[in-house]
Image (spheres, rainbow, N blue to C red):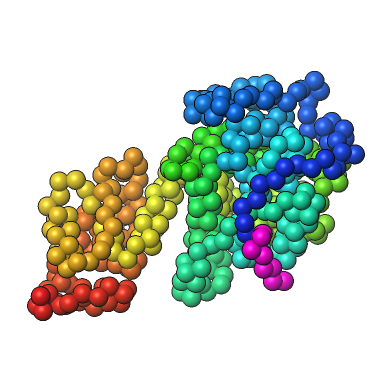
């Protein structure tokens, strides 16, 4: 794969105003994406728009848009109008380039972001650059945490996903970077379509409260899926008619394009998703970016797994506790006495408490609290911590993650 090193300018946040260019394509494009007689929503004053963003029932908006058959351009125009500067298009480097075209056609400023997993095809990197040039934009690239990817690859190798499933690698290279990016936004626009994936995308609302991710300041995130009811044929009719750039891999038989090791071309009449994670079950192919599409239980379980994994990797010493637990108090007292900085997560008061406790059990095979992790390693409960303290093993464990404390006997 050819190296692609984005410049500092590329990494900078980009807000773009649509230029007057591409006017020659205007009428053909409008005919391709806007139902006859449909008009873009009238602009509302900014103050009322901001108030609306706080008060609107977006599930109901989604249902109304679906009932009225709003075109993708109208949906995107509404998103840009409602969340100026705080909504961005998620661009995967494939056929969802039409979203960029649609946003361009609204004439409003818009933002585009992409996840660079480090495992994309050279053609996809070139395509990103082509799209930037075509629209005069800078895509906002988001990268995985290098320490997390390094730990995964050094422990399991470069292709562990073929052995034990793609979720772990996708979580590190896609889901966490996406979560970080979405945490800076109030809404996002995706290229999800109902016809893309058997089993997982059959219910893709045009507008929804994101079931899996949070927005800025832990707020509810709004997810727009303007292509929900658009077919692959219609997307490609638009790409051809408007002559927007497309990924060269499409010319080689690729339809759904993701990371290079997890994408392959499909044969005529094969479903497009058969070219992704082909070694796994068809109904379990979501990479986590749209995990709300999995069944509610599976989505909730994965969200809890992510929460636990994030917490454990986010601090050197992490203690999961519950309210009114004398063993939790004893653990915290010991760590406080030793001057050990730690993060406490009271699993009982979380909204998804039951899911988090189940996720903790999956991760540690321990059902009780406190549940203690040091440097990502599971230590056990209060009894194990006290014993480690007595034997001196705790001081060594802490030293191994860079926390220096004297042996208790020396105090
Ligand atoms: S698609 Fe494959 S390479 Fe890319 S993040 Fe997922 S498992 Fe890793």
* Residue 197 x, y percent position in the rendering: 64, 45
Q: Any magenta on residue 13? A: no
**Seen in the image, is 115 located left or right of residue 385?**
right
Q: Along the line of sight, which residue is nearer the eye, 347 or 380? A: 347
User: Is residue 340 positioned above or below 47 on the image?
Assistant: below
**Residue 37 shows in this picture:** yes
Q: Residue furthest right?
A: 24
Q: Quadrant of residue 232?
A: top right
**Residue 284 shows in this picture:** no
Q: Any magenta on residue 8? A: yes
* Residue 25 x, y percent position in the rendering: 87, 39
Q: Along the line of sight, which residue is nearer the eye, 248 or 300? A: 248
Majority SS type along the magenta span: loop
* Residue at point 19%, 45% (across, down): 323
Q: Quadrant of residue 109?
A: top right
- Part of the protein shown in magenta: 1-10
* Residue 52 x, y percent position in the rendering: 54, 25
**Seen in the image, is 94 located left or right of residue 88?**
right
Q: Quadrant of the N terminus?
A: bottom right
Q: Quadrant of the C terminus?
A: bottom left
């Amino acid at each position: 794969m050819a190296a692609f090193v984005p410049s500092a300018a590329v990494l900078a946040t980009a807000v773009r105003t649509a230029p007057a260019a591409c006017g020659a394509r205007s009428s053909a494009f409008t005919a391709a994406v806007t139902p006859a007689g449909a008009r873009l929503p009238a602009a509302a004053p900014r103050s009322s728009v901001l108030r609306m963003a706080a008060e609107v029932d977006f599930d109901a908006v989604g249902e109304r848009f679906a009932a009225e058959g709003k075109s993708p351009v109208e949906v995107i125009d509404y998103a840009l109008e409602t969340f100026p500067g705080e909504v961005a298009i998620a661009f995967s480097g494939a056929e969802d380039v039409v979203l960029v075209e649609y946003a361009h056609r609204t004439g409003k400023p818009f933002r585009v972001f992409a996840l660079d997993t480090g495992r994309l095809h050279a053609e996809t990197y070139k395509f990103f650059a082509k799209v930037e040039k075509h629209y005069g934009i800078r895509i906002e690239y988001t990268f995985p945490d290098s320490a997390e990817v390094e730990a995964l690859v050094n422990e399991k190798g470069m292709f562990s996903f073929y052995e034990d499933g793609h979720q772990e690698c996708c979580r590190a290279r896609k889901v966490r970077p996406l979560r970080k990016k979405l945490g800076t936004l109030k809404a996002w626009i995706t290229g999800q379509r109902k016809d893309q994936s058997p089993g997982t995308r059959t219910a893709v609302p045009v507008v929804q409260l994101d079931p899996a991710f949070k927005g800025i300041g832990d707020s509810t995130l709004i997810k727009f899926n303007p292509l929900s009811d658009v077919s692959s044929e219609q997307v490609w009719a638009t790409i051809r008619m408007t002559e927007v750039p497309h990924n060269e891999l499409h010319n080689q038989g690729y339809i759904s394009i993701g990371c290079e090791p997890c994408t392959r071309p499909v044969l005529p009449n094969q479903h497009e998703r058969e070219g992704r994670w082909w070694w796994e079950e068809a109904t379990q192919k979501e990479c986590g970016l749209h995990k709300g599409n999995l069944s509610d239980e599976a989505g909730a379980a994965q969200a809890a797994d992510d929460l636990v994994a994030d917490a454990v990797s986010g601090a050197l010493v992490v203690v999961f506790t519950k309210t009114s637990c004398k063993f939790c108090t004893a653990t915290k007292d010991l760590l406080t006495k030793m001057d050990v900085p730690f993060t406490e997560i009271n699993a009982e008061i979380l909204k998804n408490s039951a899911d988090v406790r189940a996720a903790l059990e999956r991760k540690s095979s321990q059902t009780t609290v406190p549940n203690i992790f040091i440097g990502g390693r599971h230590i056990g409960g209060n009894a194990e911590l006290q014993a480690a303290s007595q034997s001196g093993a705790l001081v060594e464990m802490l030293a191994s993650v860079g926390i220096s404390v004297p042996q208790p006997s020396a105090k």
